[in-house]
Image: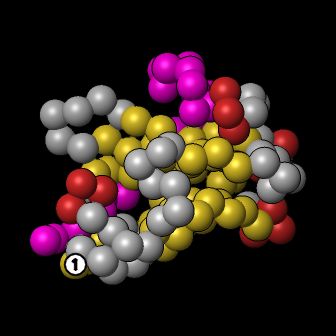
Amino acid sequence: QVQLVESGGGLVQAGGSLRLSCVASGRTFSSYTMGWFRQAPGKERQFVAAISWNSDSTYYADSVKGRFTISRDNAKNTVYLQMNSLKPEDTAVYYCAADSTTPQVMGAIPSRLIDYWGQGTHVTVSS
């Protein structure tokens, strides 16, 4: 089992920045691909970004490419999502995820197939 706890959400104005963190406990964090997903009210959960176990590979949704950066620190069992140039359409609950697949596959498979989820952190971007 892997337990994931997100933090760092909040209210920010359009154009601003936030950094989300996700701390993992349980099984070996460094063996998993880690990702971020988001779910806006009334919409399905969607992929945002993922990073391989050794940080060699990252993958982003087109909607966040160039604005968001995913990174990880295996020594701290933590994955981050740096979000810059935020837009009101980025408003959502952001979820951390862990899976034994690759970043590209994590971005393509249905979210119900992802191994582990955090409970989410709210991000609100005001216009």
Q: Is residue 116 left or right of residue 13?
A: right
The foreground one among 26 and 104 is 104
Q: Is residue 119 magenta?
A: yes
Quarter containing the N terminus: top right
Give me the residue at 48% from left, 45% from top: 62
Give me the residue at 57% from left, 25% from top: 108
In the rendered view, tell whether residue 17 sits above or below residue 87.
below
In the rendered view, tell whether residue 91 sits above or below residue 27.
below
Three-letter residue code for mark 1: Gln
> Percent from the top left, x then y, of residue 96?
52, 48
Q: Is residue 40 magenta?
A: no
Mark 1 crowd level (few <14, some 14–19, many ≥20, 10 Å Cα): some
Q: Which residue is disc 1 drawn over?
A: 13
> Percent from the top left, x then y, of residue 79?
65, 60
> Percent from the top left, x then y, of residue 52?
77, 46
Q: Is residue 124 left or right of residue 37?
A: left
Magenta highlight range? 106-127
Element type at mark 1: strand
Visual colour scheme: secondary structure
The foreground one among 39 and 119 is 39
> Percent from the top left, x then y, of residue 112?
48, 20
Quarter containing the C terminus: bottom left
The answer to whether residue 2 is visible is: no
Give me the residue at 22% from left, 67% from top: 125
Q: Is residue 38 left or right of residue 60?
A: left
The answer to whether residue 93 is visible is: yes
In the rendered view, tell whether residue 109 sits above or below residue 44.
above
In the rendered view, tell whether residue 105 sits above or below residue 84.
above
